[in-house]
Image (cartoon, rainbow, N blue to C red):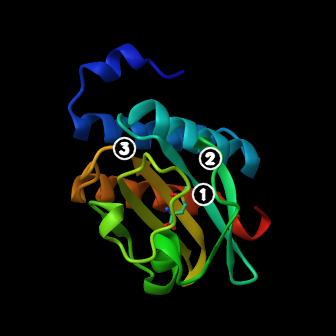
Amino acid sequence: MIKLSAVDKMTSEQKYKYMLILLEGQLSSEKNNIANLCNATAIIKAIMDRVNWAGFYILRDNTLILGMFQGLPACNRVKIGEGVCGAAVTKKEPQLVENVHDFLGHIACDYSTNSEIVIPIIKDDIVYGVLDLDSKEIGRFTKLEQRYLVEFVDILNKYIDWSKV
Ligand code: SME
């Protein structure tokens, strides 16, 4: 059970450590991929403040298809190489975008979004999709968030069979 009153008093780093503990707890106690990925996005939204969208795009037939998420309805499909999500797939590297309006090819699903971070989901050298977070605040995401979100995806990779999502 998430105790949000405790989270309020934590530093960002303490919150993100707690977020990883919550994720590990969820994934180690449930085998269903849908339940686990839904709760993964809910854990991010509950713990990380100033995030207006958090979710997955899953790679199928060279296209990223919208997966489990929290936030407003979003673009259904993103082509590899297009947008911030597509760049994360082709570059196989996290994309930390301080101001999405400066990112050539950014795909705006919600015009109030101003910054974004995308972590590619790579397991055994195969790209399965991305974890995408948006914020209305310019420069919301830093290397601190990137480090913990990469760890978040590492934990997902331990438990999720992405080929069956
Ligand atoms: N902005 C993303 C598209 C997905 S939405 O942010 C949910 C992109 O440029 O790839």
Considering every residue shown, the one lying at the far top of the view is: 5
Whole-percent x, y for residue 106 in the image:
45, 69
In the depicted view, which residue is nearer to us: 110 or 79?
A: 110
Q: Is residue 104 left or right of residue 79?
A: left
Q: Is mark 2 within 8 Å of ligand 1?
A: yes
SS class of the residue under badge 3? loop
Q: Say which residue label 3 marks.
A: 136
Q: Position of residue 110 (x, y in %)?
A: 52, 50
Compute the Cα span from label 3 to label 2.
Answer: 17 Å
Q: Which residue is mark 1?
A: 56
Q: Residues within 10 Å of mark 2 (few under 14, many from 20)?
A: many
Q: Which mark is residue 86?
A: none
Circles 2 and 1 in contact, beta carbons < 8 Å? yes
Q: Nearer the viewer, residue 82 or 43?
A: 82
Q: Amino acid at mark 2?
A: Phe
19 to 100, vertically: above or below: above
Q: Nearer the viewer, mark 1 or mark 3?
A: 3
Seen at 62% across and 46% down, the residue is 69
Return the disc, 3 or 2, that comes first in the chain's sequence: 2
Residue at the image position 73 percent from the left and 51 percent from the top: 33
Q: Is residue 38 toward the left or the right of residue 71 in the image?
A: right
Residue for badge 2: 69
SS class of the residue under badge 1?
strand
| Left or right relative to 113: residue 17 | left
